[in-house]
Image (spheres, rainbow, N blue to C red):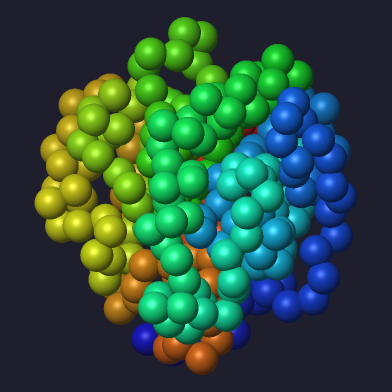
Amino acid sequence: MSITPCCLKGFEWEGKPSGRIDTIGTANAYVAGDNPDVAIFIVHDLLGWSFPNVRLLADHYARETKATVYVPDFFGGEVLPFEPICNNEWDKVDVAGFLKNNSRDIREPEIFEFARALRGKYKKVGAVGFCYGGWVVLRLGAKEHQPPLVDCVSLGHPSLLIKKDIDEVAVPVQILAPEIDAAYTAELKLHTFETLQKHGVPFDYQHFPGVVHSCFIRGDPKVVGEREAMARGKNAAVSWMNQFLQEL
């Protein structure tokens, strides 16, 4: 898979993020944009809220959806080293200890609190999650929340996902799925297809051949096809958010 200039035209993956830091409830957040009516928040992967690429992605979303975009810190200030993760040197990272400190049970209440804070401030709210954030956005869109915490969700290469997360989602769902992904298994992909078609909500599944888990945030230019997939994933998420957040 080659990277084409057309695909990457207008795509900024270098340089310095242009947003600001704010506090929403108890969470610090990177913020881009200033729309008073529409918000999107990105639930980060293991690289966390301070990873430059996720902030540049937030800048893109803000420009291209005209929304206010948040990247909250949902790891309580804990930051894993970027370089070994980006290089797949997992023996240099205490992932088990990190996930123990940031388990679903520990982090879910504060994530829901953040979503409620945005829901109280904005007319429309969308959520985008990558890796760790994948299970989060499905939980945000679960039928238990009345009224809904979010209006739509998009998730890329989800991890820590269980079938119940898929079973209970009740808002429009977009899946960005790399072909090679040990976390989002063939079994979970099949369950996604079979289940969401029965839910009566809009469902968009996008397949990304030849790329692996983490491509949508890492966007490594040294890996053939990865930056192209990341740009395509950005475009897909922007389009999905625009469909369901701009009809005020």
The residue at 47%/55% (across/down) is 98
Q: How many marks?
A: 0
Q: Residue 108 or 1: which is nearer the viewer?
A: 108
Name the one closer to the observer, 50 or 17: 50
- Left or right: 222 with respect to 81? left
Q: Give the left or right position of residue 12, taking residue 187 as reference.
A: right
| 217 lies above or below 188 | below
Query: Which is nearer the eye, 86 or 118?
Result: 86
In x, y percent, where is residue 91? 39, 78
Residue 41 in percent (x, y) is at 63, 40
Q: Position of 52 compared to 227: left or right?
A: right
Residue at 27% in and 34% down: 166
Q: Is residue 226 visible?
A: no
Q: Where is residue 225? Give x, y as percent.
A: 43, 82
**Residue that lies at the very extreme toward the top in this rendered image:** 146
Q: Who's the residue at 49% across and 65% down the image? A: 216
**Could you tell me which quadrant the C terminus lies in?**
top right
Viewer-nearest residue: 87 or 226: 87
> What's the residue at 33%, 38% (across, down)?
203
The N terminus - image quarter: bottom left
As drawn, 146 above or below 199: above
Q: From the top left corner, tell me how far across and down residue 45 is, in percent.
A: 51, 56
The reply to whether residue 30 is visible in this rendering is yes
